[in-house]
Amino acid sequence: MPTVPHAGGDSGEAADRDRGAARLSGPLFRDEREPQPGPRQPAGRRPTPPDPAPDPASADGARGADDGQGKKSAGRNLRAAIGVGVGLGVIILASLFIYKPVFVGVVAVAVVVGLWELTSRLTERKDIRVPLVPLAVGGVAMVVAGYVRGAQGAVVAVALTALAVLVWRMTEPPDNYLRDVTAGVFAAFYVPFLATFVALMLDTDDGPWRVLTFLLLTVVSDTGAYAVGWRFGKHPLAPRISPGKTREGLLGAVTFAMAAGALCMQFLIDDGVWWQGLLLGLAAAVSATLGDLGESMIKRDLGIKDMGKLLPGHGGIMDRLDSLLPTAPVVWLLLVIFVGGG
């Protein structure tokens, strides 16, 4: 933290002002670096201003740091991020097209880990004690029920999960009961319920191709936002939520996703038409961006940069699910409207 000047030669009022300035100069969030004192300058020479610290990294990478040669750096370990991304992609595609129940298991594992990250951060930063056991069991049940029994099974599972959270929390003292169970029900809807729509997409004749389309649209949207925002981003999109996101990045996300949507609907989805893909890509880009901003809002409130550290170069599982979760019901609904439930 910044040092407070000694009060030996100052009046009490001046010392109070110095202490107030010190408090206001500290970082508001963990991802904002504290300015460090620079080297002492010889007398009579103008001080050299310190290099500006880069803004916190965000998905579209619009405000990367300068690498010393006039080029922007991406603001994260791209080699690790690409390696982890490729590894996850291989696991997902292999399970998706070889044996669908294994893919359901992959989704269930991601849901449980995501719930663990979210509830852990809520406890650490806000002392909100969400019961993880009923959430984890209910989250797996939602995904499996969505795949086996369809939408009706998923609705029953989410209702029972919410009830289990209410009852499980009764075993502890009543202090903050309402706060804890409210956060628990929110977590049940935010992570496993939204993930259930992936299982609903899978349970169709061309299910693997629908899920692949959903994944491609989300990944392409994030990639377009990152690439265009990093290279051309100048106008902030939501500076109070995510300072690195730009309008140019959003335009890149929409353009890339619409192009990918047209190709996917034309060549991957049974009875799909290219113009439907344009609408699908537009909706996916918007929902992915809103999902990213939504999780950024949560992390800002918690005062953290990442939900976890499980995935090098990416953060935690929740930092990868942020755009996928809200996009799943959007893609599922539009595919049902365009080509039916399969």
Image (spheres, rainbow, N blue to C red):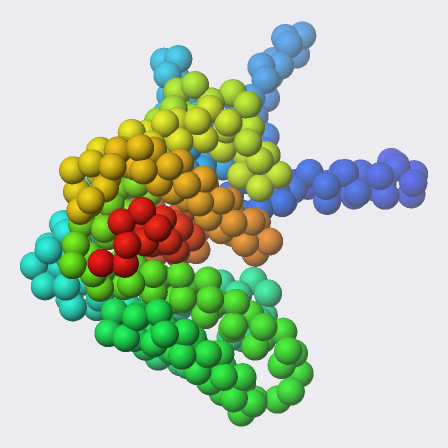
- For image coordinates 54% across by 84% down, the residue present is 166
Front one among 291 and 239: 291
Count of marks overlaid on the render:
0
Residue 181, image x, y percentages: 56, 77
Residue 132, image x, y percentages: 43, 76
Residue 262, image x, y percentages: 27, 33
| 135 up-or-down from 186: above or below | below
**In this rendering, does residue 121 appear at all?**
yes
Residue 69, image x, y percentages: 36, 13
| 188 up-or-down from 98: above or below | below
- For image coordinates 17% across by 47% down, the residue present is 270
- For image coordinates 63% across by 8% down, the residue present is 45
Front one among 87 and 95: 95
- For image coordinates 56% across by 49% down, the residue present is 297
| 292 up-or-down from 152: above or below | above
Front one among 74 and 207: 207
Looking at the image, the residue that sits furthest to the left is: 98
Looking at the image, the residue that sits furthest to the bottom is: 171
Q: Indicate left or right for 50 with 276 as reference.
A: right
**In this rendering, does residue 223 appear at all?**
no
Front one among 274 and 116: 274
Q: Quadrant of the C terminus?
A: bottom left
Q: Quadrant of the N terminus?
A: top right
